[in-house]
Image (spheres, grey):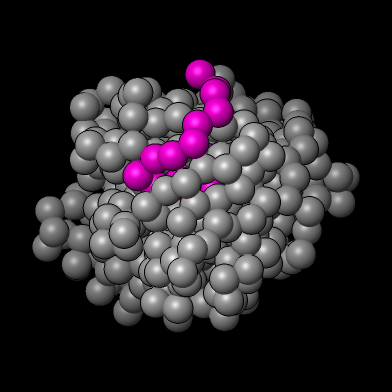
């Protein structure tokens, strides 16, 4: 229930998956948390997310965070109450330039106990006849990965946090400071004082951080997907979630006979808005790429889609950070289209930094 509060151990700005995973972790450790977001729970990128989860981090940007997070998701969270991972399997396709990275990352995951198979392009074609992996050297198959309904996971995190968490449907307008420390946040519903503050508001974190001299070089990037209903639904039987590192295409089953498919976009500085439609140009851009990967989509009916965004750093990957020049402040931002699969590990890391940062 939403109600106004004056103080908590930690204030969190942004009710996306990064903020929620942190809040759940803090609440589990006995701390009180107030979260503020004018869009409510999962009203930003999180609510639009395709929810693909896998342990593999082919580009090696995020250490073990994806693997650790998949373990948490497979356990259905600390209390076993989160939605179950749809274990359709995850297939990451790669080109010649990524062969070494795929071997190394696959080997590390196997050593850590994750089920991983390295496939040639011929293996991929034989195992998954719906796919036409032209231009692909091979694939990494994770049979225990897949996808999750992102909004339901967000709701489960709130439930797990229980009465130690209060959510304000309010915009954070200013960081409160005293004697050089960040001591809370002013919101459209009133001031929240706290021992430490987490900014997990995507690009909305930038002006707040700037007030205490913290520069977050973030922009927004367009992330969206289309829904396609192919004539031949039988062809899709057994299709795993697919991420094609050579084209930026990704897809998963949506519901009966419908596929959700997106292709990474280079469009940046887009509005931080979620819309339940896509333009004709975006539909055509996505269709053109994914019909080559999955020929059954060639004559598929377009049934809708989502146009949304995520925050990305202009100079590197997303990060969780404490700021010595602004004691009491922690940031967890910049996940650039891949933050859902990292969230449990990001939340654990941010919670640890916030405890250290508390006065
Ligand atoms: C279409 C789409 C598909 C995706 N698919 C996948 C996927 O398959 N797998 C995967 O791992 N990742 C995926 N992602 C990426 C993933 O969803 C994001 O990286 C992740 O949800 C980001 O979480 P967040 O908490 O950082 O940000 P958000 O979910 O955007 O949350 C930030 C919140 O901050 C709030 N806010 C902003 N300013 C303020 C303010 N001043 N005061 C209070 N609140 C404020 C916003 O309203 C927002 O709710 C996808 C993203 C999109 C858009």
Q: Is residue 52 left or right of residue 265?
A: left
Residue at x-position 39% and y-position 55%: 196
Q: Quadrant of the C terminus?
A: bottom left
Total tally of numbered discs in the picture: 0
**Could you say which quadrant of the image residue 123 lies in?**
bottom left
Residue 187 visible somewhere in the drawing: yes
Q: Is residue 224 left or right of residue 24?
A: right
Q: Is residue 14 magenta?
A: yes
Tell which of 278 and 206 is nearer to you: 206
Q: Is residue 124 magenta?
A: no
Where is residue 358 shown, x and y percent of the image?
31, 57
Where is residue 140 shown, x and y percent of the image?
34, 59
Where is residue 323 shown, x and y percent of the image?
42, 73
Magenta-drawn segment = 1-18
Q: Is residue 280 left or right of residue 72?
A: right
Residue at x-position 67% and y-position 51%: 173
Tell which of 153 and 251 is nearer to you: 153
Rendered view: 140 above or below 284: below
Rendered view: 261 above or below 338: above
Residue at x-position 45% and y-position 78%: 325
Rendered view: 359 above or below 46: below
Extreme-right residue of the structure: 280
Residue 44 visible somewhere in the drawing: no
**Could you say which quadrant of the image residue 214 lies in?**
bottom right
Extreme-front residue of the structure: 179
Residue at x-position 33% and y-position 37%: 32
């Amino acid at each position: 229930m939403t109600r106004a509060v004056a103080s908590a151990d930690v204030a969190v700005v942004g009710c996306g998956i990064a903020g929620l995973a942190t809040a759940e972790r803090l609440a589990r450790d006995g701390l009180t948390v107030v979260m503020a977001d004018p869009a409510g729970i999962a009203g930003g990128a999180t609510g639009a997310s395709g929810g693909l989860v896998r342990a593999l981090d082919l580009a090696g940007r995020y250490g073990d965070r994806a693997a650790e997070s998949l373990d948490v998701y497979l356990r259905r969270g600390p209390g076993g109450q989160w939605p179950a991972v749809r274990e359709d399997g995850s297939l990451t396709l790669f080109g010649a330039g990524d062969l070494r990275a795929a071997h190394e990352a696959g080997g590390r995951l196997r050593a850590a106990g994750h089920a991983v198979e390295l496939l040639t392009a011929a293996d991929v074609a034989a195992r998954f006849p719906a796919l036409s992996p032209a231009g692909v050297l091979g694939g990494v198959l994770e049979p225990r990965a897949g996808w999750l309904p992102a909004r339901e996971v967000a709701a489960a995190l709130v439930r797990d946090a229980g009465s130690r968490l209060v959510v304000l449907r309010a915009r954070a307008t200013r960081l409160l400071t005293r004697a050089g420390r960040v001591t809370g946040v002013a919101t459209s519903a009133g001031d929240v004082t706290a021992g430490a503050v987490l900014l997990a508001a995507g690009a909305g974190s930038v002006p707040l951080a700037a007030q205490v001299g913290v520069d977050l070089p973030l922009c927004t990037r367009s992330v969206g997907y289309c829904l396609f209903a192919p004539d031949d639904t039988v062809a899709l039987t057994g299709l795993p979630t697919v991420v094609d590192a050579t084209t930026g295409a990704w897809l998963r089953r949506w519901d009966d006979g419908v596929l959700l498919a997106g292709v990474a976009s280079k469009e940046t500085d887009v509005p931080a808005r979620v819309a339940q439609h896509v333009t004709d140009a975006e539909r055509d851009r996505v269709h053109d790429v994914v019909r080559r990967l999955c020929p059954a989509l060639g004559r598929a009916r377009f049934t809708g889609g989502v146009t949304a965004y995520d925050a990305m750093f202009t100079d590197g990957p997303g990060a969780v950070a404490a700021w010595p020049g602004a004691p009491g402040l922690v940031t967890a931002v910049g996940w650039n289209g891949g933050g859902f699969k990292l969230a449990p590990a990001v939340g654990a890391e941010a919670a640890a930094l916030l405890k250290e940062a508390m006065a």
